[in-house]
């Protein structure tokens, strides 16, 4: 679950260099009442049958949260990540770092 204070781990090609951080702010994504996100997600999943591609690769804006992360190795560094509700604690988009996942 995406909540302020949750610990996150950065995805990194060299596992030992992955950073740890803390979510410091969470904002719910506000979708317009006429949003067509459900039909767009259905179209995307039909084009990618068998769930060969995870939902973290679906580029449809849909319900989720935007989270700000402060990193333990550099407290002045703040990055932004989008966690869609159907991505099970893994960020879809990350601005300022690699994608992250919530540490359970």
Image: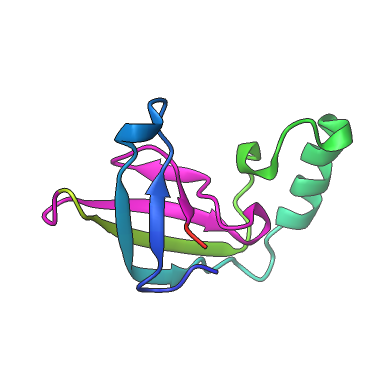
Identify which residue is drawn at 30% across, 56% down: 21
Residue nearest the viewer, comparing 5 with 95: 5
Corner quadrant of residue 52: top right
Apparent side of residue 103 relative to residue 79 in the rendered image (left or right): right
Q: What span is colored magenta in the figure?
A: 74-102
Identify which residue is drawn at 17% across, 50% down: 77
Q: How many marks?
A: 0
Which residue is situated farthest in the top direction here?
Answer: 13
| Residue 90 within the magenta-colored segment of the rendering | yes
Apparent side of residue 42 relative to residue 4 in the rendered image (left or right): right
Viewport quadrant of the N terminus: bottom right
Image vertical order of residue 42 relative to residue 30, above or below: above
Image vertical order of residue 93 relative to residue 64, above or below: above
Q: x, y percentage for residue 87? A: 63, 52
Residue nearest the viewer, comparing 47 with 37: 47
Which residue is situated farthest in the front direction here?
Answer: 16
Image vertical order of residue 8 relative to residue 52, above or below: below
Q: x, y percentage for residue 24? A: 29, 69
Q: How is the image coloured?
A: rainbow
Image vertical order of residue 30 relative to residue 97, above or below: below
Identify which residue is drawn at 37% across, 74% down: 4
Apparent side of residue 1 relative to residue 33 in the rendered image (left or right): left
Q: x, y percentage for residue 94? A: 40, 44
Identify which residue is drawn at 81% across, 40% down: 45
| Residue 99 within the magenta-colored segment of the rendering | yes
Q: x, y percentage for residue 47? A: 83, 31
């Amino acid at each position: 679950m995406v909540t302020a204070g949750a610990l996150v781990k950065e995805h990194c090609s060299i596992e030992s260099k992955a950073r740890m951080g803390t979510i410091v702010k969470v904002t719910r994504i506000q979708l317009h009442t006429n949003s067509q996100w459900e039909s767009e997600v259905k179209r995307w999943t039909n084009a990618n049958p068998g769930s060969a591609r995870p939902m973290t690769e679906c580029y449809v804006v849909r319900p989720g949260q935007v989270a700000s992360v402060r990193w333990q190795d550099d407290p002045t560094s703040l990055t932004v990540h989008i966690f869609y509700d159907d991505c099970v604690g893994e960020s879809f988009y990350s601005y300022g770092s690699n994608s992250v996942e919530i540490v359970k």
